[in-house]
Image (tube, rainbow, N blue to C red):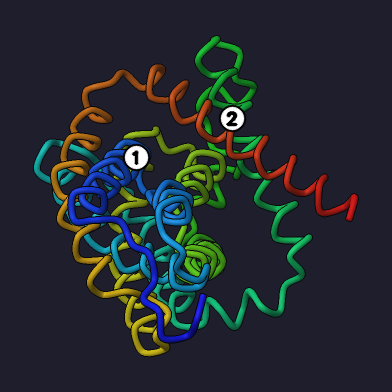
Amino acid sequence: MPPNEPHVRPGTAGAVTIGVTGGAVGGLLGGGSGVFFVPALDRFTDLPRRILHGTSTTANITVCAVGATVYALAGGAVDLRAGTGLIIGGIAGGFFGAGLLARIPDRVLRILFIAVVVLTAAKLYLDAAGLDPLAGRAALATGLLSNLWFVIPLTCVAGVIIGAWAAALGLGGGLLAVPTLVLLFGADLHTAAGTSLLMFVPNSVTGAIMHLRKGTASPGLSGWLSLGAVPGTIAGALLALALPSVVLGVVFGTFALLMGIREIAHFVRLSEV
């Protein structure tokens, strides 16, 4: 495309529709709306990939803020013991996300992501079948979890990694934050989702500021996505709170498994090149 020719973008109705759907995904799963935003924008625009990720990060502010508010007002729980460190680390990750990720080989990032989502899917399916070897307990010992000198540094480090991944790629961090809370801290899915949404409010703001400063986000398109995300996130969060934990676990587990399969297929294709 010639440099002065305007980029193809979805119309107002299309952008709002993408926002509604992405918001519903984020509200239901405790974040991760960018997993829908980025592919949808890639399908309906010809914007550079970096603009898609930055625009998704900016729109995630609305998803996380509205979702966290719904969880707070509708009886959802938040685990501040783990959430505090995740928030602190997530803010740092938002500032230094692109730089940090640039230092980590793409192959390593993909392998870590695949491991997390596949293990999460397996745990949630086993839990739904009543076969969870952890029986709903945390993978970490109870004594360690009661020690704030251990928990805060651990969650800060996890927050930096998750926040960097989310802010740099614009994919939302729920797909990593929720499994971290479930696997390491034994949080139930409703608490994990509410904590994840709260965590990514400051992270999304930080990431959006960095993307807007660098010109790697479209403010206008982000605005329409955000407008649609408001009702979508409210509906998704209310649905998540209404679903029994087992059903929500199957939904999240299926989503995580599909993301894992997609990443494995992409990893194999890259290895064959």
9 over 128 or under it: above or below: below
Q: Position of residue 57 (x, y in %)?
A: 37, 66
Q: Residue visible at 44% across and 72% down?
A: 51
- Under circle 1, the secondary element is helix
Residue 260 in view of the camera: yes
Of 165 and 57, nearer the camera is: 57
- Under circle 2, the secondary element is helix
Q: Which residue is mark 2?
A: 121
Residue neighbourhood size for the residue with mark 1, other residues' Cα within 10 Å, grouped as few (<14), some (14–19), many (≥20): many
152 over 28 or under it: above or below: below
Q: Is residue 44 left or right of residue 107?
A: left
Q: Residue visible at 23% across and 56% down?
A: 11
Q: Quadrant of residue 201?
A: bottom left
Q: Residue visible at 60% across and 44% down?
A: 140
- Say which of marks 2 and 1 sits in front: 1
**Which mark, residue 101?**
none
Of 27 and 87, nearer the camera is: 27
Amino acid found under the numbered disc labelled 1: Val
Q: Position of residue 59 (x, y in %)?
A: 29, 62
Q: Position of residue 145 (x, y in %)?
A: 50, 50
Q: Which residue is mark 1?
A: 25
